[in-house]
Amino acid sequence: MEKFRVCSIAGCGKPGHKDGDRRTCELNCPTGIALDSNDAVWVTDRQNHCIRRLPGREDKVDLLREECIITAVGQPKKPGPIEYASVPGNRAFFREPGGICCAFGGVYVTDRENHAIRFLSQTDQPLTTGVMVSTISGDPGKEGSAACGWNSRPVPLRQGRLNRPLGIAASAAAASGYSGGGRVLFVADAGNNCLRRIDLDKDELSTLESGGDHPSRLELAVPMGVALDPGNCIYVSEWGSHRIARISGDGAVVAVAGGGSRGVKDGCGSSEARLFHPCGLAFDAGRGVLYAADFGNHCIRRITAAGDVTSIGRSGVVIVDDGRRYVSSSLGCIDSEDASQACFNSPQGVAVDSAGDVWVADWGNHAVRKIERV
């Protein structure tokens, strides 16, 4: 049986905005987390309305900045509207950025309260001045209806409408089924209770449909996180139904963990395991394991290919469980050589690096944490 330890990487436990040394820097409700091909860590700093970054292994930084976090794009503490035109990163506005993924040579962000998808591209200038930000889909500042993009004919990206999108993930190179090949993104459109498909090559936004002879919109209960495995099966976490589902290329939906009642319980599959408001998802392709940020239970769940669900971190203290309400209280921010004794506080995002270690956006602790094998 694998053993893990948990350590804090960045953030000091209190909300704020401060760049610099990772041990004394400040974040405010980090939500999404992703790693690029250089293993640089990108974090959506939700209540600071900006994107933060930790250096990768090949970054050319001096020794004094090797363990520093920077504001890569956005204007800290200044939420604002967006435009389709490409602007320098330090002039771009965000409004509560949520999910993030690194794919196809760039970084994609769900700009939650601007109801849009943003794209970050690197120029040949230094990182702090050389990132350009553009909008690829959504009507800036306006809530949209899924019906605008849900029909048999996908709509151009700029005509698409989103409603508080959160999770975002990219398809693998050899795509099939829903992915269909090419550069494809999947977005958890939480406000519209559906999954959206963005085909960057075809400039198309569509809504996933169920399989069968009479396909219809694939209805989900407030989808929050999305991840894909090497075979391009889609995993989605549903905040409203406390479950994680797998969607195959033919539209079949199978619950892999949780569902129905909320709670905290390890076990096998949806019949035994219980979750409470699952959020971010990440798939470890090398080990065939899915990781989920169990927001309400203050822990990380690990789901094997066989469907076994286990917890990393203490699951908090259940204060109320009377059949109508379920409330769990975090035990704080505690690192430990024994991951079962570590504590998180409403984690929202997870990501897996090239070594198979898991990075966590620990929302309530205003920190970036790391789960390592021992």
Image (spheres, helix red, strand yellow):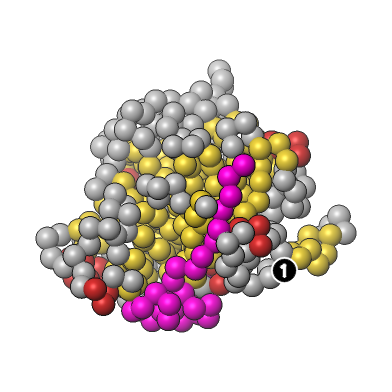
The residue at the point 20 percent across, 73 percent down is 62
Place of residue 126 in the rendered image (x, y in percent of width and height, measured from the top left): 16, 68
Could you say which is closer to the camera, residue 287 or residue 140?
287
Could you say which is closer to the camera, residue 261 or residue 368?
368
The residue at the point 27 percent across, 44 percent down is 104
In magenta segment, residue 6: yes
- 62 left or right of 298 in image: left
* Residue type (three-letter) at the residue carrying disc 1: Ser
Place of residue 318 in the rendered image (x, y in percent of width and height, measured from the top left): 79, 63
**Residue at far top of view:** 213
The residue at the point 55 percent across, 47 percent down is 291
So how many labels did they put on this image?
Answer: 1
Q: Main secondary structure of the magenta part?
A: loop
Residue where numbered disc 1 is placed? 329
Q: What residue range appears in magenta? A: 1-30
The quadrant in which the N terminus is found is top right
Place of residue 144 in the rendered image (x, y in percent of width and height, measured from the top left): 46, 54
